[in-house]
Amino acid sequence: MSMTNNQPKPVDKKKLGIATLAIMNIVAVVSLRGLPAEAEYGLSSIFYYIFAAIFFLIPVSLVAAELATGWPEKGGIFRWVGEAFGPRWAFLAMFMLWI
């Protein structure tokens, strides 16, 4: 006679993967606001999204990754710009990012 343990199994915490983060960024960039323009330009709009990814999104993510390893403290862009140029420029950088 075997006895089974009726203890609940520990729940594995799910983490965000690369694919999930990529899709979240695509959704943030390609919002519903741009759908009429995409419908007007058709398949040629795919070129512009790939162009933006190669020449803007990928370099920005590489710079952010490099800065995050150089300054592991919390604060992100505000911290990086603040340490380099002061709090006034850090506020301006965050304001421009928000806009």
Image (cartoon, helix red, strand yellow):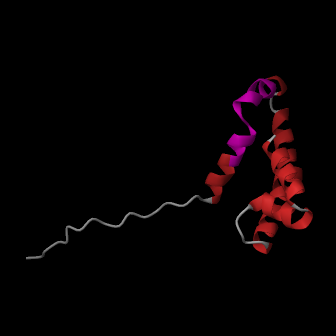
Foreground: 97 or 1?
Answer: 97
Q: Residue furthest left?
A: 1
Q: Residue at x 76, y 68 (%)?
A: 68
Which quarter of the figure has residue 36? Answer: top right
Q: Number of numbered discs present?
A: 0
Q: Is residue 50 magenta?
A: no
Quadrant housing the N terminus: bottom left
Q: Residue at x 85, y 56 (%)?
A: 90
Q: Percent position (x, y) of residue 17?
A: 60, 59
Q: Percent position (x, y) of residue 65?
A: 77, 65
Residue range in magenta is: 25-39
Q: Residue at x 77, y 25 (%)?
A: 39
Quadrant housing the C terminus: top right
Foreground: 55 or 42?
Answer: 55
Vertical placement of residue 22 versus 99, above or below: below
Q: Residue furthest right?
A: 85
Q: Is residue 33 magenta?
A: yes
**Left or right: 5 in relation to 17:** left
Vertical placement of residue 63 versus 38, above or below: below
Which quarter of the figure has residue 33? Answer: top right
Q: Percent position (x, y) of residue 20?
A: 61, 52
Q: Residue at x 68, y 52 (%)?
A: 22
Look at the magenta stretch and give its main secondary structure. helix
